[in-house]
Amino acid sequence: MTKLKRMRPLLGTFVEIGIITKQNNGSDAISSAFKQIEMIQKLLSFHDPNSDLTKLNKFGSKGVELNPISADVLRLALHMTGITQGEFNCTVGGSLIKKGILPNHSGVPPLTVGTADDVTLNGCIATLLRPVSITLDGIAKGYAVDQAINTLQAHGINSGWVNAGGDLRVFGELEVPVYRRELDESLSFLGHFSNTAISTSSINTNHNPRFPSMIIDSKNISRKIGVWTVKANMSWLADALTKVAGVVTEHAITNRVSSLGGELIYSKPL
């Protein structure tokens, strides 16, 4: 058995890919997985003025043809926005622009927040019916982790993990110890995990470069500060459900996350 680990700066964080294999193609498998992540980053980065996402936010009123991967992620995000009735909401880009967290490539102030009904997606053609700004950063990062796992498995790798700064997925015959960094920089041991995806998101009073993501409460459900960790079978889903956990009332978190296909494994409101 050979254990290989590689790390690269991607997705606004450091991405680590590790595998355990008997084969000789381990380095090639990891390189292919990183290429998959790089492609998804190029397609769906809010910061890249040439990404599919930027084109949608700039020209979406006329309809934009997306790469099939971009369309797939947008479809998942719209689905989650709809079934959670905005607890997860991919149309809050305008709010993040207003806070100075995300850039405005269009030059026109977008609506602070919208709904899933503000976007249509027919095949790969996406249209914005109102001037909302779509942000897919969190769910796209989880999706990239899932696709990297698919790439490793397609190369015959039976065990491994991908860790993208808050989005972790493990597969095969191994257990990975997981520690979570809290808002005060302390570490909390969450346990050993196998064959699952785990994601963590936080709400803080101030924008912290160690915690660059931010949960926007588009329904004014609550005003909380804290950190939430969710387990699911896919990283994109686990990441999306951390946003739900961050806005629903504290007593309802466990049941709400469970009803949407996840499991709340750690909640630390402040």
Image (tube, rainbow, N blue to C red):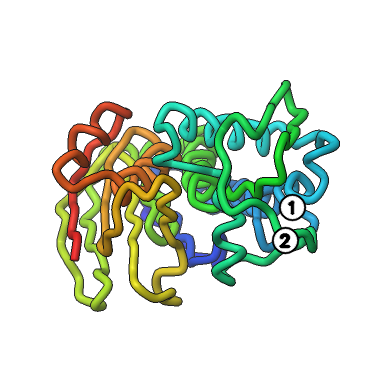
What whole-number distance in Å separates the C-alpha atoms at marks 2 and 1? 7 Å
Q: How far across and down, in percent of the image, does residue 73 sit?
A: 59, 36
Residue bearing the label numbered 1: 54
Q: Is residue 187 above or below residue 201?
A: below
Q: Name which quarter of the figure residue 126 lies in.
A: top right
Q: Is residue 128 above or below residue 199?
A: above
In this rendering, does residue 173 appear at all?
A: yes
Which of the two residues, 214 or 26, is positioned nearer the viewer here?
A: 214
Element on which disc 1 rests: helix
Q: In what quadrant of the picture does the C terminus appear? A: bottom left
Find residue 28 and name its label: none
| Residue shown at the point (41%, 45%) measured from the top left | 219
Query: Dot 1 surroundings within 10 Å: few (below 14), some, or many (20 or more)?
Result: many
The amino acid sitting under disc 1 is Thr
Determine whether, in the image, residue 40 is placed left or right of residue 61: left
In the rendering, at what x and y percent does residue 177 appear?
21, 56
Tell me which label, 2 or 1, sits earlier in the chain: 2
Which residue in the protein does label 2 denote? 48
Q: Which x, y percent locates residue 16?
A: 44, 60
- What is the residue that sits farthest to the top in this orientation? 122
Q: Is 17 located above or below residue 257 in the figure? A: below
Task: Report the mark closest to the observer, 2 or 1.
Answer: 1
Tell me the amino acid under the disc marked 2. Answer: Asp
Taking the spot 30% from the left edge, 58% from the top edge, the residue there is 223
Q: How many marks?
A: 2
Q: Are marks 2 and 1 in contact (CB under 8 Å)?
A: yes
How many other residues sit within 10 Å of disc 2, few (<14), some (14-19) or many (≥20)?
Answer: some
Residue at x 19% of width, y 60% of height: 269
Q: Nearer the viewer, residue 246 or 13?
A: 246
Residue 120 screen position, x and y as percent: 68, 27
